[in-house]
Amino acid sequence: MLDSQSIHLTTLDSADLHRLQAVLGAICCEAGKPKCSPAMQEIAAVLIRLYRHGVTEEDKLLSLGLMALTQKVSSPVAADSVQSPSEAARP
């Protein structure tokens, strides 16, 4: 028997998809990026995973989606600023 959290591990219905699309749309507006951009496609996948694991409130999905986007955007910059041990040893 499925409990209330595992029920979301089943197939998403049209109401679920509508809710997720609304959240993704809000994130796209905030970020100024189209839904078809690679970054937004990754955020969409994050939202689906969160939803399937029981995070179904739109405000929580929005907050977590924006947080994931912020981490994704800041991640390449942070990676560029970190030197490998061999680079740090160079004079």
Image: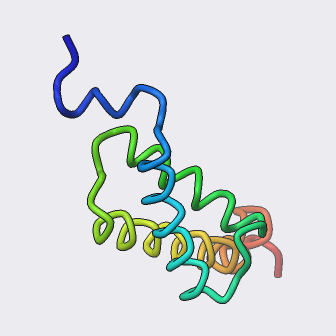
The quadrant the C terminus occupies is bottom right
Q: Nearer the viewer, residue 32 or 73?
A: 32
- Pick out the residue farthest to the front: 14
Tell me which residue sits at (39%, 39%) in the image: 52
- 2 w.r.t. 52: above or below: above
Quadrant in the rendering for residue 77? bottom right
Left or right, 56 with respect to 20, comes to left
Q: How many marks?
A: 0
The quadrant the N terminus occupies is top left
Left or right, 7 with respect to 75, comes to left
Q: How is the image coloured?
A: rainbow
Q: Nearer the viewer, residue 6 or 18?
A: 18
Tell me which residue sits at (69%, 73%) in the image: 76
Q: Nearer the viewer, residue 3 or 46?
A: 3
Tell me which residue sits at (77%, 69%) in the image: 37
Report x, y in % for residue 80: 73, 76
Report x, y in % for residue 32: 66, 89
- Pick out the residue farthest to the top: 1
Report x, y in % for residue 47: 48, 55
Quadrant in the rendering for residue 69? bottom right
Quadrant in the rendering for residue 30? bottom right
Report x, y in % for residue 86: 78, 63
Tell me which residue sits at (36%, 63%) in the image: 61
- 14 w.r.t. 23: above or below: above
- 34 w.r.t. 84: above or below: below
Left or right, 54 with respect to 45, comes to left
